[in-house]
Structures are given as C-alpha cells and as structure tokens.
Amino acid sequence: MKKLILSVSVIAAIVFTSCKNEAKKDNEPTAKTEQIKDVAMANISFGVRGNCEMCKSTIEKAANSVEGVSKAVWDVDAKKIDVSFDDTKTNEMAIHNAIAGSGYDTEKMSANPEAYSELPSCCQYDHEMAMNQTK
C-alpha cells in the first residue's frame, strides 16, 4: 500500500510540475512579441491645405503611400493631418514631400505646381488659407 501511495505521489508531482512549466512558457515573451515592441512608432500632426472630401482622399492616399506610414487621417475642417509611422523606415519630411507631390501645400512644403494644376477644380484651394486649425 505504501508503494502505491508513493507511486501516485510521484506521478502527481511530475504532472503538476509539467503543467506549471507549460503555463510559464505561455507567459514568456516570444521573439515576435519583442520585435513588435522594438518598432519605433511616431505620431505627428501638421497642416495641409485642401477643400473637400476628394482632397481628403488624395492627401491620405499620398501620406499612406510612404513606406512605414501605418495611418494618415486628414481633417477637412481643421486642415490638419494626423500621421502614425515607423520612424525607422521614414521621416516627417518624406511625408510632407509625398503630400506636396500630390498637389497640396503642407506647413513645410509648397505643392508641386503641375500636380496642383491637375487637381479637380473643387480641390484647387486658396494658397493663403489657414491650416492646422484647432476646433
């Protein structure tokens, strides 16, 4: 009888230890998780001139075309874009350049004149309009 109790105790201890080690493994960070933490995300906001929803689509498309940009949202009323990007892949000026290249003035760059002239008439904005407005 003592041998049976001892055997059951040893088996229970092995099973308990094995389960405990498995639980630890699930909580340990993986290499993939650590890589995600290392990504250096930056968030910026700056003014961009434009008029309408068509402008919004073009401006956001230009910003999102830059490698490393994960999100770009332009506010029609505030004339401001909010951009999230991986600053190991791009920088703020690359985003300004892409938007200016699509025909829109930013706080740091004037629009490409040829691209501006090709914008639909509703998108041809006043080059003196205020941008980056607070609501």
Image (cartoon, rainbow, N blue to C red):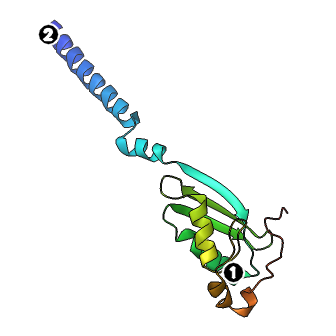
Counting other residues with Cα less than 10 Å from the Cα at mark 2, is it few (<14), some (14-19), or many (20 or more)? few
**Tag 1's secondary structure?**
helix
Which kind of residue does numbered mark 1 sit on? Cys
**As rendered, which of 101 and 17 lies closer to the eye?**
101
User: Where does the N terminus fall, quadrant-wise?
Assistant: top left
x%, y% of residue 55? 69, 81
**Tag count:** 2
Q: Label 2's element?
A: helix
Q: Which residue is mark 2?
A: 3
Q: Can you tell which of label 1 and label 2 is closer to the viewer?
A: 1
Quadrant for residue 93, please give it. bottom right
Q: Is residue 125 left or right of residue 87?
A: right
**Percent coordinates x, y for residue 80 in the rendering:** 74, 66
Which quadrant of the view contains residue 73? Answer: bottom right
Percent across and percent down for residue 25 are 34, 33
Q: CA distance from mark 1 to mark 2?
A: 82 Å
Along the viewing direction, whichever of 72 and 98 lies nearer the viewer: 98
Q: Is residue 65 above or below residue 20?
A: below
| Three-letter code, disc 2 | Lys
Q: Which residue is mark 1?
A: 55
